Image (cartoon, rainbow, N blue to C red):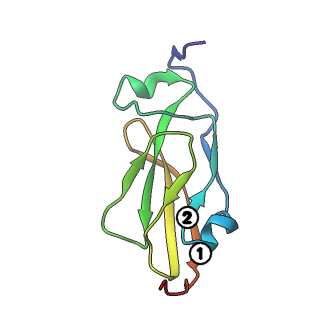
Amino acid sequence: MAPAVSAAPQPAAHLVVGQPLAGPLSAGLVVITFRTESLKIVPVYGATASQVVPRLGHLHITVDDGPWHWLHASEEPIIIQGLPSGPHRVLIELADANHKILEAETRAFDIPQRPASH
């Protein structure tokens, strides 16, 4: 069923973020699952997209308080690789089609030290 365009009020969007999965994290790979309520994650942006029901949006992802972020516009898990061993933080922001932040969650985790390869 295709989304309908409407100006009717919608319930507030909500972001639910899991902790990084332990198995992949032990190998240095960060996999974070999430789900949204009252918002569909899709790569559609702009004023027209903001009128669609159910609401459309995407995620802004920032690692370690960096000066930049990237967009995550699918319902697949967030996957980050190549981080050095040690503590890290990922800020996950739920944004509407116009990039307005609706809600945010932060996940802190440690990448374990990996043995040196021969």
Element assignment for label 1: strand
Name the disc covering residue 30, or none: 2
Circle nearer the N terminus (2, 1):
2
Where residue 56 sits: x, y (%)?
Answer: 49, 31
Q: Residue at x 55, y 13 (%)?
A: 2
Q: Residue at x 40, y 72 (%)?
A: 65
Element assignment for label 2: strand
- Figure quadrant of residue 43: top left
- Figure quadrant of residue 61: bottom left
Q: Relative to residue 15, is residue 9 depicted above or below?
A: above
Q: Please state which amino acid type lies under the numbered disc 2.
A: Val
Q: Residue at x 54, y 72 (%)?
A: 28
Count residues near mark 2 (Cα–Cα under 10 Å), then give few for <14, some for 14-19, many for 20+: many
Where residue 23 sits: x, y (%)?
Answer: 68, 66
Count residues near mark 1 (Cα–Cα under 10 Å), then give few for <14, some for 14-19, many for 20+: some
Q: Relative to residue 78, is residue 1 depicted above or below?
A: above
Residue for badge 1: 109
Q: Please state which amino acid type lies under the numbered disc 1.
A: Phe
- For the residues bearing labels 2 and 1, Cβ distance under 8 angstroms: yes
Q: Relative to residue 7, is residue 113 depicted above or below?
A: below
Q: Residue at x 49, y 54 (%)?
A: 93
Where residue 90 sits: x, y (%)?
Answer: 50, 66
- Figure quadrant of residue 48: top left
